């Protein structure tokens, strides 16, 4: 799918519209615009660089996607045809990239494609869960309910991510302050202390001399430090993009002290909520497990879910298949087991998701409470060392000249 910048005259308002449109060719883009009552004046295909820039500047946020989904569900529930519902959404949307995508979806739907297939053409915006729920809604004739479930699922997921990020913000700010204080002391105060002692031909105390040496290294080899940091970030990113690196990084996330249990609860809540949404929409269990495995966004947890799916395919109950998986928390398999007995697996997965969402909220508050004094102690120790390194030589000078 190509992206075109266009200028076109709207035949109803006689105004010139400048925006973007996605189509398979320039001719298809022109047809798409004419079908919308616009006369193309200029069509220019974006370069790959321009396409990347467009995606960055017109990023489709979770909020944009949720609003689009909710409004779409409302319009379908009101009895409007798909194409008309999409055109109505087109008029209400401000995000240029989303406008372009909706145009592409309209073209696909009017060309005879199913709505789920039209959404599937944009996997970076509409993931597997989204497409599968739309397909299930189309098959069962409950597309409006499916869209409502998708919006609820996305809201829950965004809320979970917000809680985890909230737990990481405070430590990041304090660590940033600590690094800033150290950098300021090393780059401004320490050189002055060294200069003063050189003028007076005095020997620096050990602590001060050590920090002065570090300061001189930073001042003289700052370019080397920047190069090393860039290299570390670059090669770390490249390693994480490999299968082995991604697995090592995801294992670290769920094993690291303090934050590991937080991530485990996040992944369990995501798995259970996605599974509940899919099964309530009529998606088959094996397909639900395959989609949920991708939705958790952790390869270690995904592998555990896929191993369980293989066992289910071999005839085992899902609760039994999940029970012996190390990274699947016990409550999930227990709740699913109750659901298997009562015939309501989706409801019990929903209860498991709610439990872990509440646990995640509690864990975030607990971590924030526990980490605050630790960071304050670290900040106090760093400040004490820096102040000591400054005051010790001053006291030394005062004592040496008082005698």
Image (cartoon, rainbow, N blue to C red):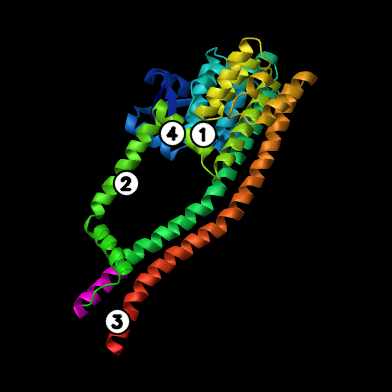
Instruction: Name the residue carrying label 2.
Output: 229
Q: Mark 4 or 2 closer to N-term?
A: 4
* Marks 4/1: CA–CA distance: 16 Å
The quarter in which the N terminus is drawn is top left
State the extent of the magenta-drawn residues as a range: 189-201
Q: Quadrant of residue 283?
A: top right
Label 3 Cα neighbours within 10 Å, binned few <14 / some 14-19 / many ≥20: some
How packed mark 1 is, by other alpha carbons closer than 10 Å (few <14, some 14-19, many 20 or more), is few
Residue at image point 51% right, 41% down: 256
Q: Is residue 345 left or right of residue 392?
A: right
Residue matched to label 1: 13
Q: Decide if residue 32 is on the left or right side of residue 318.
A: left
**First in residue order: circle 2 vs circle 3:** 2
Above or below, comparing residue 245 to residue 83 in the picture: below
The circle drawn on residue 132 is none
| Residue 268 at x, y percent in the picture | 62, 32
Q: Distance from label 4 to label 2 (Cα)?
A: 40 Å
- Most extreme residue toward the right is 342
Q: Nearer the viewer, mark 3 or mark 1?
A: 3
Whichever of labels 1 and 2 marks the residue nearer the N terminus, that label is 1
């Amino acid at each position: 799918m190509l992206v075109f910048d266009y200028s076109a005259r709207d035949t109803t308002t006689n105004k010139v519209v400048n925006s973007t449109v996605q189509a398979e060719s320039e001719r298809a883009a022109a047809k798409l615009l004419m079908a919308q009552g616009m006369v193309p004046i200029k069509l220019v295909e974006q370069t790959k660089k321009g396409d990347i820039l467009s995606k960055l500047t017109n990023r489709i946020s979770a909020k944009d996607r949720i609003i689009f989904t909710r409004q779409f569900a409302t319009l379908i529930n009101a009895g409007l045809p798909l194409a008309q519902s999409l055109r109505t959404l087109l008029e209400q949307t401000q995000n240029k990239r989303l406008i372009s995508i909706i145009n592409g979806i309209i073209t696909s739907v009017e060309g005879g494609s199913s709505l789920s297939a039209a959404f599937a053409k944009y996997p970076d915006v509409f993931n597997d869960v989204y497409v599968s729920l739309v397909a299930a809604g189309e098959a069962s004739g409950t597309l409006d309910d499916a869209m409502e479930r998708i919006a609820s699922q996305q809201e829950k997921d965004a809320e979970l991510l917000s809680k985890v990020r909230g737990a990481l913000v405070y430590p990041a700010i304090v660590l940033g302050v600590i690094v800033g204080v150290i950098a300021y002391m090393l780059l401004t105060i320490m050189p002055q202390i060294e200069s003063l002692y050189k003028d007076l031909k005095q020997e620096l105390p050990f602590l001060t001399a050590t920090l002065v040496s570090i300061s001189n290294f930073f001042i003289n080899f700052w370019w080397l430090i920047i190069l090393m940091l860039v290299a570390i970030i670059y090669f770390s990113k490249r390693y994480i993009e490999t299968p082995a690196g991604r697995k090592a990084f995801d294992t670290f996330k769920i094993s690291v002290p303090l934050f590991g249990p937080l991530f485990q609860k996040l992944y369990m809540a995501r798995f259970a909520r996605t599974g509940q949404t899919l099964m309530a929409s009529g998606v088959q269990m094996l397909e639900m497990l395959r989609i949920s495995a991708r939705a958790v966004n952790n390869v270690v947890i995904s592998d555990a879910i896929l191993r369980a799916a293989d066992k289910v395919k071999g005839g085992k109950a899902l609760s039994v298949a999940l029970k012996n998986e190390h990274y699947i928390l016990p409550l999930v398999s227990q709740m699913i087991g109750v659901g298997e007995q009562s015939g309501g697996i989706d409801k019990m997965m929903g209860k498991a998701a709610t439990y872990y969402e509440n646990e995640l909220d509690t864990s975030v508050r607990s971590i924030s409470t526990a980490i605050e004094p630790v960071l304050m102690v670290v900040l106090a120790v760093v400040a004490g060392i820096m102040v000591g390194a400054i005051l010790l030589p001053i006291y030394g000078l005062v004592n040496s000249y008082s005698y």
